[in-house]
Amino acid sequence: MSGPSVQLLAHTAEPERTVALAARLCYSARGVADLAAGLSEAEVESLLEKLLAMGHLSALEHAQFTLGVEGISRACSHQLVRHRVASYSQQSQRYVALRRVQAVVPPSIEDRPELAAAFRRALEQAWALYGRLVDEGVPAEDARYLLPNACETKLVVSMNARELRHFFSLRLCRRAQWEVRALARAMLGAVEAVAPRLFRGAGPGCLAGSCPEGAYSCGQAAEVRRELAEGVRRDP
């Protein structure tokens, strides 16, 4: 299984500078017309560091990122869209007839050949009946009731930097479901490439302090810190 594919489609021009401009307005007597005057890279760095350290994250909402996501299951997308401070456009199963098996097989099944073979047979049977229903005039919007949560889907997702940091704090946790965690890693890699300072330290609470999960902690905080420090593009 290749895992989620994430592509950064668009973003706010100069996202870090845009956030710094908003912060500059908050912390100085300057008027809007003078906000950009003499704003150096050193001041951008200082303002971003101040915002993140103090938890004053409203200015991060001025930086928007639009991502194209492929290769995730409907089960994963149901978790993604729970993050409501975002915009989503998802491939329709009502208007798009799915003529071939497109599904995500969980590693816990993939790693057991006998079970993986049975799983794939079930998928092929479901798709065969789905195709027959469509061929016999059943609307795709009704035939889709047969399709499993494993069915692959595609989305365009837009989030601001503040909501992305919130998403990463929950979904990069070791207790997050494996597929949405892989998606979060891929999304972090995509946005970090264009705005590394905005996403510095992004991830679960255990990166900066004690685990916020309390009694439900995975007990692997050191491994999580090491894993993210080594780079989000590395396989977990």
Image (cartoon, rainbow, N blue to C red):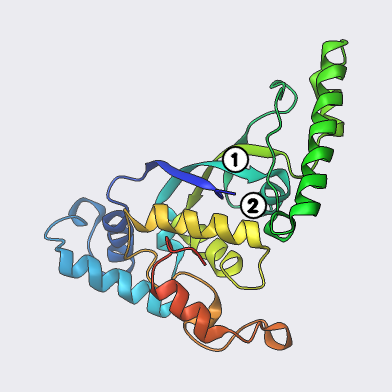
Counting residues from the N terminus, which is met first, the one under dot 2 or under dot 1?
Answer: 2
Q: Regarding mark 1 in the picture, which secondary structure is present there?
A: strand
Q: Nearer the viewer, residue 203 or 228?
A: 228
Q: Residue at x 43, y 47 (%)?
A: 65
**For this view, does 53 lie left or right of residue 31?**
right
Q: Nearer the viewer, residue 37 or 214?
A: 214
Q: Residue furthest front?
A: 114
| Residue 167 placement (x, y as % from top left) | 56, 61
Is 207 above or below relative to 93?
Answer: below
- The residue that mark 2 highlights is 80
| Residue 166 placement (x, y as % from top left) | 55, 65
Is 88 above or below relative to 93?
Answer: below
Q: Residue at x 38, y 72 (%)?
A: 230
Cβ atoms under marks 2 and 1 closer than 8 Å:
yes
- The residue that mark 1 highlights is 88
Q: Regarding mark 2 in the picture, which secondary structure is present there?
A: helix
Q: Residue at x 41, y 79 (%)?
A: 54
| Residue 139 placement (x, y as % from top left) | 83, 17
How many neighbours does mark 2 have within 10 angstroms: few (below 14), some (14-19), or many (20 or more)?
Answer: some
Is 161 above or below relative to 89?
Answer: below
How many angstroms separate mark 2 from mark 1 (CA)? 9 Å
Q: Which mark is residue 107?
A: none
Q: Residue furthest left?
A: 38
Q: Amino acid at mark 1?
A: Tyr
| Residue 96 placement (x, y as % from top left) | 69, 22
Q: Nearer the viewer, residue 81 or 59?
A: 81
Q: Residue at x 76, y 50 (%)?
A: 116
How many neighbours does mark 1 have within 10 angstroms: few (below 14), some (14-19), or many (20 or more)?
Answer: some
**For this view, does 186 lie left or right of residue 82?**
left
Closest to the camera, between mark 2 and mark 1, is 2
Q: Can you tell which quarter of the image residue 30 is in?
A: bottom left
